[in-house]
């Protein structure tokens, strides 16, 4: 497909309040898999000032609705916001504090599936009697035990999957999303497990509820060589599938750049399977083999067209880059980034185009050194006005060295190989274990 022109979708994306057009976002995923155990809304409120000072623009919060799983990913009563993370009152206080600090709250929108309150004709809990949005079995896809239509995406096993082809379902979801926006105060949305339903519905939900920014979790398996089961160098098919999904939302929704994560950490475990939180599947026993890119395959970070090899290289303004999240890392560890190379990962995504995301654990739980180094890279990104569409000139991409110039304002390297820019006008701005950043 090649690089996508933003002009094609800019008019359609106007409803995003200029956030995508501006391209100067830095996101914080403000939870991990264990956060529900720690009075989370109140805990986060105590960190809002630091979050704002560090320069985050939007904070992705865990699912706020009542759920059969404490993590929030088995929702039931969508209008009940008393959850294991705290009370509605505590959530309101947190969001108000974030607003006062000019930080947007991002809701984790789990609308692929919903657990019922009453058994239907098949014996599954796929009726929603006695709670708001009291659907019957016709709101559930036929392939997950309901009386609705066939799913328009992948099935999420073990729970009733919502049939988004039903007009009454979409009407109720839109009303709920608008309620989250206008009454609760969420300004941004993160759509969970978007492989489960057609992207055209995400487009409709964004058009009608008008979040300022939206990102989808389209977690698809990377490309692997059948001969030796190693990650293929060419991941064009993988990133094309993500880009096709973004394009089908009219460009209104960005997507997490799983391609870039996969290449940065190259693992031989087929970990990018799209597994979701409530699936009863154990990936933690997978044997992690071979090398990571950051451990000796940095040549992978330059594609045949001299561009970054992820979604970042083709549609950077819709690429939400990240190192880790609550699924891939935390106590789940489905697809973890090598812990001794995390700062190299941040040195890459915080100096490059795309919309970078920082994981809570790295920023707040790994000690002051990680916090301060990440905050310093964020400060450099902002001071040098690096944004989602910044131009990248890759200088070196070998086994143990990657270096690049971004917008002719910033120069960086990662890897064990020695390197520094030859022009004396470049001044060292930050450095750490196997990374360095310069600016003029």
Image (tube, rainbow, N blue to C red):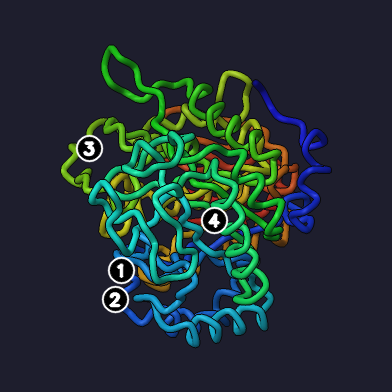
Give the secondary structure at mark 4.
strand
> Is 374 rendered above or below residue 169?
below
Q: Quadrant of the N terminus?
A: top right
Judging by the rendered image, the residue that carries numbered circle 1 is 70
> Is 334 rendered above or below residue 361?
above
**Image disc number at residue 285:** none
Give the secondary structure at mark 3.
loop
Real-space CA distance between mark 1 and mark 3, rounded to the nearest whole angstrom: 29 Å
**Image disc number at residue 288:** 3
Q: Earlier in the sequence, mark 4 or mark 2?
A: 2
Q: Earlier in the sequence, mark 4 or mark 3?
A: 4
Judging by the rendered image, the residue that carries numbered circle 4 is 190
Q: Earlier in the sequence, mark 2 or mark 1?
A: 2
Real-space CA distance between mark 4 and mark 3, rounded to the nearest whole angstrom: 29 Å
Real-space CA distance between mark 4 and mark 1, rounded to the nearest whole angstrom: 19 Å
User: Closer to us: mark 1 or mark 3?
Assistant: 1
Q: Nearer the viewer, residue 22 or 405?
A: 22
Judging by the rendered image, the residue that carries numbered circle 2 is 37
Residue projecting furthest to the top: 227
Real-space CA distance between mark 2 and mark 1, rounded to the nearest whole angstrom: 8 Å
- Check if mark 2's residue and mark 1's residue have beta carbons within 8 Å: yes
Real-space CA distance between mark 4 and mark 2, rounded to the nearest whole angstrom: 22 Å
Question: Relative to 192, is 4 on the left or the right?
Answer: right
Residue 253 in view, yes or no: yes
Q: Earlier in the sequence, mark 3 or mark 2?
A: 2
User: Closer to us: mark 4 or mark 3?
Assistant: 4
Real-space CA distance between mark 3 and mark 2, rounded to the nearest whole angstrom: 29 Å
Counting from the top left corner in percent of width and height, residue 111 is at 48, 53
């Amino acid at each position: 497909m090649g690089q996508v022109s933003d002009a094609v979708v800019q008019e359609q994306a106007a409803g995003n309040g200029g956030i995508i057009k501006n391209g100067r976002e830095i996101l914080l995923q403000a939870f991990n898999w264990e956060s529900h155990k720690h009075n989370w809304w109140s805990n986060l409120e105590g960190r809002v000032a630091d979050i704002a000072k560090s320069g985050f623009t939007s904070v992705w919060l865990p699912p706020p609705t009542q759920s059969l799983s404490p993590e929030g990913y088995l929702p039931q009563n969508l209008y009940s916001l008393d959850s294991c993370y705290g009370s509605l009152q505590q959530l309101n206080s947190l969001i108000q504090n974030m607003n006062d600090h000019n930080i947007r709250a991002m809701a984790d929108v789990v609308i692929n599936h919903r657990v019922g309150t009453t058994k239907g004709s098949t014996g599954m809990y796929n009726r929603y009697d006695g709670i708001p949005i009291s659907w019957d079995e016709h709101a559930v896809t036929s392939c997950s035990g309901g009386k609705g239509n066939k799913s328009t995406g992948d099935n999420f096993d073990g729970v009733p999957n919502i049939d988004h082809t039903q007009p009454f379902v979409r009407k109720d979801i839109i009303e709920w999303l608008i309620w989250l926006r206008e009454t609760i105060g969420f300004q941004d949305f993160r759509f969970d497990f978007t492989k489960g339903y057609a992207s055209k519905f995400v487009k409709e939900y964004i058009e009608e509820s008008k979040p300022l920014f939206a990102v989808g979790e389209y977690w698809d398996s990377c490309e692997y060589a059948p001969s030796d089961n190693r990650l293929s160098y060419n991941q064009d098919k993988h990133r094309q599938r993500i880009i096709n999904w973004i394009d089908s939302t009219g460009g209104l929704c960005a997507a997490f750049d799983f391609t870039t994560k996969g290449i940065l950490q190259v693992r031989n475990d087929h970990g990018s399977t799209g597994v979701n939180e409530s699936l009863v599947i154990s990936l933690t026993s997978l044997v992690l083999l071979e090398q990571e890119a950051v451990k000796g395959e940095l040549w992978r970070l330059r594609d045949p067209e001299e561009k970054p090899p992820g979604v970042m290289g083709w549609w950077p303004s819709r690429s939400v880059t990240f190192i880790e999240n609550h699924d891939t890392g935390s106590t789940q560890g489905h697809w973890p980034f090598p812990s001794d190379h995390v700062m190299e990962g941040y040195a890459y995504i915080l100096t490059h185009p795309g919309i970078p995301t920082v994981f809570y654990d790295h920023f707040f739980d790994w000690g002051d050194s990680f916090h301060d180094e990440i905050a310093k890279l964020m400060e450099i990104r902002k001071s040098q006005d690096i944004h989602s569409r910044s131009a990248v000139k890759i200088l070196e991409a070998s086994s143990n060295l990657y270096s690049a110039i971004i917008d002719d304002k910033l120069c960086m390297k990662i890897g064990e190989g020695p390197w520094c820019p030859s022009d004396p006008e470049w001044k060292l701005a930050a450095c750490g274990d196997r990374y360095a950043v310069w600016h003029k």
